[in-house]
Image: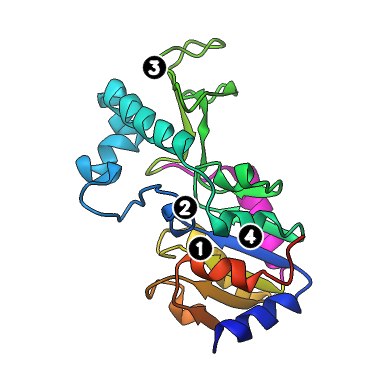
Amino acid sequence: MSLDDARAVLTNATRITSFSGAGLSAESGIATFRDTPDSHWSRYDPTRLASPEGFADDPDLVLNWYGDRRRDIAAASPNDAHRALANCPAVTHVTQNVDDLLERAGASDVIHLHGTIGADRCHAECGFRETIDMADPPHRRPCPTCGAPMRPAVVWFGEMLPADAWEAALSTIEHCDVLLVIGTSAVVYPAAGLIDVARQGGARVVVVNPEASGATGDADIEIRATAGEAVPILLADLTQ
């Protein structure tokens, strides 16, 4: 099916949920986990950078690495796909991304399955959390409530997804009639299982990705293009 077919499916829908991954922000210059050899992720073993064990072993390495990522995100701008999604008030957004580019584009209903890099939280989970300045990220410091180390409020390897975000994502995807899957490899679980949830609920699945992914076999319509190329066209009839 064509871009026009997918556009018609979205235009005729009443409950649309977007489900995005790193490919949504790639055109803003945010490196993906499986990116080129000079990406942030390629410089170290990811388990040293994004796991409780890595943080315990070398907190300064982890925090310095996240500081670099935070400064990159602060300097980045939303791309055409972010803006097109944000300009559709009827669309609910579920994202695996930890950046704030959807919000900066103007989206107000964003569910972050893997947390947000724009905040720190207590590593001991006492409940303390604070927004940080990504252009000038903090260094190692104790939680002001309990004294445990502060860390980025993102989900690391081996950790559970935030229960509130997971329940919110399940609720919106169970009740959508179109799931627009954008720029995700769809191989990271449990998040990737949300595509099956949409199909079981009777939703149509429209996938936007420049190459085949784990969502290819679940797609009713697959558009082989980048998010910035396809999403503004797909949502042109729904924007404010």
Mark closer to the observer (2, 3): 2
Badge 4 amino acid:
Ala
**Residue 123 visible in the shown view:** yes
Mark 3 element type = loop
Do callouts 2 and 3 mark residues in contact (Cβ within 8 Å)?
A: no
Q: What residue is at 59 percent from the left and 76 percent from the top?
A: 205
Q: Is tag 4's residue or tag 2's residue first in the polypeptide sequence? A: 2
Residue range corresponding to the magenta coloring: 159-176
| Residue at image mark 3 | 139
Q: Which residue is mark 1?
A: 228
Q: Is residue 70 magenta?
A: no
Which numbered circle lies on residue 84? 4
- Of the residues tagged 3 and 1, which is closer to the observer? 1
Asked which secondary structure carries label 4, the reply is helix
Q: Nearer the viewer, residue 133 or 59?
A: 133
Q: Amino acid at mark 3?
A: His
- Give the mark nearest the N terminus, 1 or 2: 2
Pick the front one: 90 or 238: 238
Give how far apart the Cα atoms at labels 1 and 4 are.
Answer: 9 Å
